[in-house]
Amino acid sequence: MHPIAYPLQVSDKNKSPHYLPVKQKFNEFSWDSVTGMVLANVLQQDLQSYSLEEFRSDCQAKFKELLSETEVWDWLDHMYFTNDAVLKVSPLFLLFKAQKAAREEGEDAAANHRMRDMFSGLLGDFKLDDRPRDNLHFIEQAMLDVLERRMRQPFSKPRSKEHAYLPFLAAAFQRDLQFLAAHPQYMMSELSNTLKLFAFSYCAQLALAIHDWRKGPPQPKELYFILDFEKASSERDKIRERGYRLLADASRALFPVLSAREVMQPEGGELPLWKMYADAQGFEDQRSLIDDINRYLVDFAPTRGLEPPPAADNLEAAFAQFIDLAVKQFSSRKSERHGVNSKYVGALEKKIFADFVMFRGRAGNVLMLNQDQLLLLTNLAIGQKDKLRFFELLRAYEQRGFFFDNKSQQVLIEFFERMGNVERMSDSGEAVYVRKTV
């Protein structure tokens, strides 16, 4: 079987790509809905058509059995169901959000499903072996018992057919979900924020890695942040050169390259470009692949008003020319395709990156984390351990796509010291430990 589509077919239109949660329009994500769907996926359980009103009736029947005073139910009903406070009892109640999302239709629902699919790609075959176990009082535990009897397994939705584009980030995401499941109340409050953190990191790291298809699975790419309470001077080279400006430039290639990947996609599950290239390198009939790519480029270039490149004589050159031409078709500012790509870039800026970008005077736009985002990232990075050495914490940040220069690292230590979650065994950096706050 050919490792890429064979023969390659020229189309007048660029295909909508997998691996990207945004489109040129209709990107109004409901993070409540996305959170519910991701939780259903990781638990591999859902509530099918069980409504919140049916659950309320079942709870009423349950408490009639448990409690003799009928007025107690009226009090519980008001406390838990008047303002949907019951949904905050346990992470499992977020499954009602997934159920609602499954019934929704239209463009907004499609946006939520694209985001769900992105996280499904990060999850792969991963699932939580045990449900989050809450330390609940008698009343709330009774409600949870009612819910758990209606949770359905096996799960009705198939797993993603996408091969992870960023395996290092997928591994970190899966570890972080295990950590959150071990702390249900923290999961309840921070699961949506965790998904926003990973949505940013996924799209940012994907943009930085999109041309890095020759070397196998991508590794974390340097992308530098500051903290929202520190100064950003234009003299900080890493912040200036490998921060927002780098991300903004790299994002312009995402849609062109991923759309080109769709043309190469063979039958079966969706594969990253780096995986296709690795498979193609192991294919016996290299000549047929090279000839087909050369033929495709000769046919494709005139449809985009471009000059065909010279025929490639090896697989790497053929792939490189394929990607180069895919990007060039969007380069003319007068073309309709340039406008389409600009809409994709704008959607990323507004819907995925905005919470992590701040304008800082002469320094311009910079990537930043506020204190809540930093504490969440820190707790996730430390995970199941009680504490990490500071330099180990920095490496854990980087595995999630967040880098800090030397000046920010010093600000981090000072911030953690003010919070009281630093243990300093000596004056050397290696002996500074940071504890999580959960």
Image (cartoon, rainbow, N blue to C red):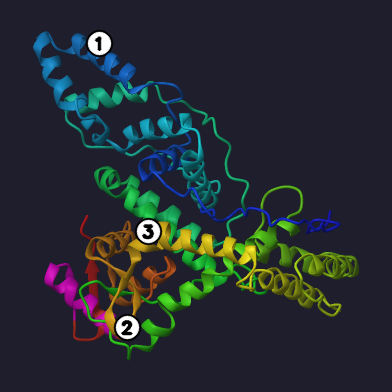
What type is the residue that disc 3 sits on? Leu
Give the vertical position of 43 relative to 8 (above or below): above
What type is the residue that disc 2 sits on? Ala
From the image, tell me which residue sits under label 3. Answer: 197
- Residue nearest the viewer, comparing 195 with 278: 195
Q: Position of residue 343 (x, y in %)?
A: 52, 60
Give the vertical position of 219 relative to 234 (above or below): above
Magenta region, main secondary structure:
helix
**For the residue carrying disc 3, how many other residues have a C-alpha within 10 Å: few (<14), some (14-19), or many (20+)?**
many
- Outermost front residue: 334
From the image, tell me which residue sits under label 2. Answer: 363
- Residue nearest the viewer, comparing 47 with 367: 367
Q: Which residues are magenta?
A: 407-425
**For the residue carrying disc 2, how many other residues have a C-alpha within 10 Å: few (<14), some (14-19), or many (20+)?**
some
State the residue at coordinates (66%, 66%): 274
Q: Which of pointers 3 and 2 lies earlier in the amino acid sequence?
A: 3
From the image, tell me which residue sits under label 1. Answer: 61
Q: Is 78 situated left or right of 373 in this image?
A: left
Tag 3 secondary structure: helix
Q: Which of pointers 2 and 1 lies earlier in the amino acid sequence?
A: 1
What type is the residue that disc 1 sits on? Ala
